[in-house]
Amino acid sequence: MSQDTYNRLWTNAQKDLDAQLQTEREQFLQPEKDHVKAFRMLAASYINYLQIFHRLEEAHSHLIHQQKRAAIRRVLDGVIGRILEMKKEMVGLENSEFHYTDNVIEDLKLLPEDTEIPIPEYFVKENLEGLQQREKTLHEILLNAGLETEKPVEAMRFEEAIKMIQVAERARQGRRRALFMKQIHLEEKRKRHTKLQEQTGPDPDDAATCIQKVWRGYIQRKKTEKMREEEMIFLGMSNPPHLRALRSTPHMHTRQEDALQAEVQERHEEEFIKDKLRETEGLDIRETLQDQIRQCFMECRHIIGRFPDYPAKEAGGSMAIFSQKTPEQVAAELAAQREMALQKKSQKEKKRKRKRKGKRKRKEGTENWKETVWQNRDEGRDFLQDHDPELIKAEKREEVEEEIRVQVDELMQQKLEELKLAVDGEKSSKKKKGKKSEKKKAGRKKISELEEDLTPDRTIDSLYRELAEEGVLIKAKPVNLSDYVGEYSYLGTTLRQVNIEPMPSLADIRQLIALYGILPLGSQTAHEKAPLVKALLLAGPTGVGKRMLVHAICTETGANLFNLSPSNIGGKYPGKNGLQMMLHMVLKVAKQLQPSVVWIGDTEKTFYKAVPKAEEQMNPKRLEKILPKFLKALKAEDRVLLVGTTSRPFDAKIKPFCKVYQKIILIPRPDYASRFVLWKHAITQHGGEITKLLSISCLAKLSDGFTQGCIVQVVRAVLSELRLLQMARKPLCTAEFLTPLASQDPVYNEEEETFKAWYAKTPLGRARSKAAAKREKAGKGKGKKK
């Protein structure tokens, strides 16, 4: 699609966003007492934001113009944050991580696929080179440490090599011989044709062909010249014929033509313009600031009889001076400005008003940025969709002024001290007092064990290498979130209406991973502004894909993966100091090279009620007391996520367990719809073909209770290399999968009930049980009144 299509998509998304915000202002001001109505309002807003998110992400990923992409990026981050806020409100209202909105989707005339959360491409694309370099470095470190081996290259036998060379040489000789014979044949044909012409005279057909060739060449050259001229007019590098005679100067539109001929400078254009501004306007800005500050000093001494104290850097420096003017001074300045304005010409006054309006519009915020900047802009000449230097100048001018203001503050502070000493005979002692107070404040601050820098003399590269060599920093498998196949639950709302709590579907799990794991780690703005999630727990039976989801989070965001599982860190960094050093190194590298994921597999062992004798030597509980400190050291700006996976959460002490993990996601065995989709996906992915002899519905029904891992193992066992070779003459049938499926261990109902009972003891489970009891009690009270 063209750029105009994505511009319209962006415009429509912005209009829908404005309409959604206006709707929320009208609806959310008054509290809603009805639980069902409140949830429908939140769910409708949540789904509308998802639709806006879809359109903005598509426009951002396909538009070429960098400044447009930057503008969309800001709105996109805001929409991501709003989606996370709406999700938090829905969780607080229903006391559940899983929500069933099939009735709302039906009212909005949408499909379940429309509510899928897209993963923005810029999460990985913006830092693709750095991620590739980091992956290459990690691969080399693991190879040198012997933790990873390269695939051996099979050497070719001597006889095979000779045979291959002979085949290639014979083919080359055959091609050369065929070319030589073709040339001889054409030469003989030409000679025969020449002799025939000498005997019978020129052929009329040959003459006509020659004339046609010359004429068609002439016509084509004319068409090409005309197309070239039209292209130059379209690019703005030439004027139409009727305007060429009206050109006043030969250098009209030279800037536009030069901009079109220049190459696209993606990375360094903003810095180049900023340096240019510093060179051209820096001196004038410096002199203007000095004059303003000097005048302010003199006015203050004239009013209060002495020079004022220069504001500290923390208070804003010279900016605080201008904000501290008295009302009389402001009124006098306004009166002087009015007198100056009356003396000027009316034309200049109109120009100044236009400029003020333009500046005011640029400062209004993001509500009408689309209309003021891009809505009515003529982009017919912007064929390259590159950048607009004037917009960059307007943004960078404030940064240049701020940099110069800092330098001017240092200079004017010295001059103020000299003036005080020369005129009033005062000496400034503010600096010394400030330093002493700062030292006292610094001495009072308490630094936690993990925030203290235990490795001040070591570089991040050396820490990265050590963690990789020790096996703490591991390589994430390239798995996307879309590879976690599962279907949407269509009966959730119906079951809840009859007071039956449905088990979540795999599509619900996929959405929660995107909301709590991928979106905050991928967007710095969303991580800082949206509700913060520091720790995430994935609980479920063996084989439901918990480890796969951890690797998917790392793949979609380009995050580092640290493995702090008890089985992995057993015997490494022994003692209390060693453990503190290891977590300090992990925290330091994770913050410096963010985003990062810290994974603890079999995390229930860290919070064991009683350690089994077979695992006492491994000391699995060594992280129990230090994990809360680890989470406390993570700030809002640190894109670091702690992810724990467990298949036996009921073996752990529930109070400290739930205190560490802020969000708990219970992953069940797949339902019928998810099994149907999974069987079909796994068979086609491994090279199989689905025919009439293969009943996917039958396999989905027979595999009730089996996890995703069991289904994938069965498919791999059946579709061997030999079976794939026989596929053409012997199609797959249902019976081939039954024997391997019978050898797998299913998840029985008793185990699933155990997981449900454990989840009911978590904070969110208890809150939901209390809310349900209150609603039931209120319902009984109304029945008695009736």
Image: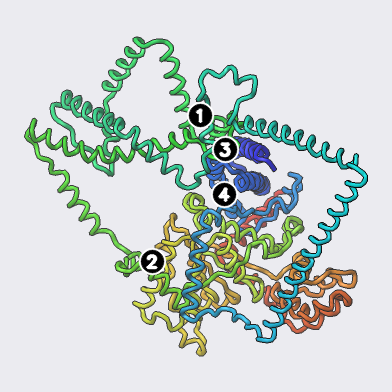
Instruction: Tell me the element at label 4.
Output: helix
Amino acid type at image mark 4: Ile
Q: Residues within 10 Å of mark 2 (few under 14, many from 20)?
A: some
Q: Quadrant of residue 703?
A: bottom right
Going from N to C along the chain, the mark reached first, 4 or 3, is 3
Q: Quadrant of residue 228?
A: top right
Q: Choose mark 1 or mark 2, whichever is in front.
A: 1
Q: CB under 8 Å between callouts 1 and 2?
A: no
> What label sits on residue 80 in the rendered view?
4
Q: CB under 8 Å between callouts 2 and 3?
A: no
* Residue nearest the observer in this picture, 277 or 548: 277
Instruction: Tell me the element at label 1.
Output: helix
Give x and y (percent) for residue 633. 40, 63
> What label sits on residue 29 in the rendered view?
3
The residue to which callout 1 is attached is 254
* Residue nearest the observer in this picture, 405 or 366: 405
Q: Point out the image quarter for the N terminus.
A: top right
Q: Choose mark 4 or mark 3, whichever is in front.
A: 4
* Residue nearest the observer in this picture, 94 or 213: 213
Q: Choose mark 4 or mark 2, whichever is in front.
A: 2
Instruction: Tell me the element at label 3.
Output: loop
Going from N to C along the chain, the mark reached first, 4 or 2, is 4
Give x and y (percent) for residue 275. 37, 40
Distance CA(mark 2)–CA(mark 3): 50 Å
Question: In the picture shown, does residue 540 fall above or below 149?
Answer: above
> What label sits on residue 460 in the rendered view?
2
Distance CA(mark 4)–CA(mark 3): 22 Å
- Left/right of residue 192 with respect to residue 390 in the rendered view: right
Camera sees residue 595: yes
Give x and y (percent) for residue 292. 26, 28
Distance CA(mark 4)–CA(mark 2): 31 Å
- Left/right of residue 615 with respect to residue 700 in the rendered view: left
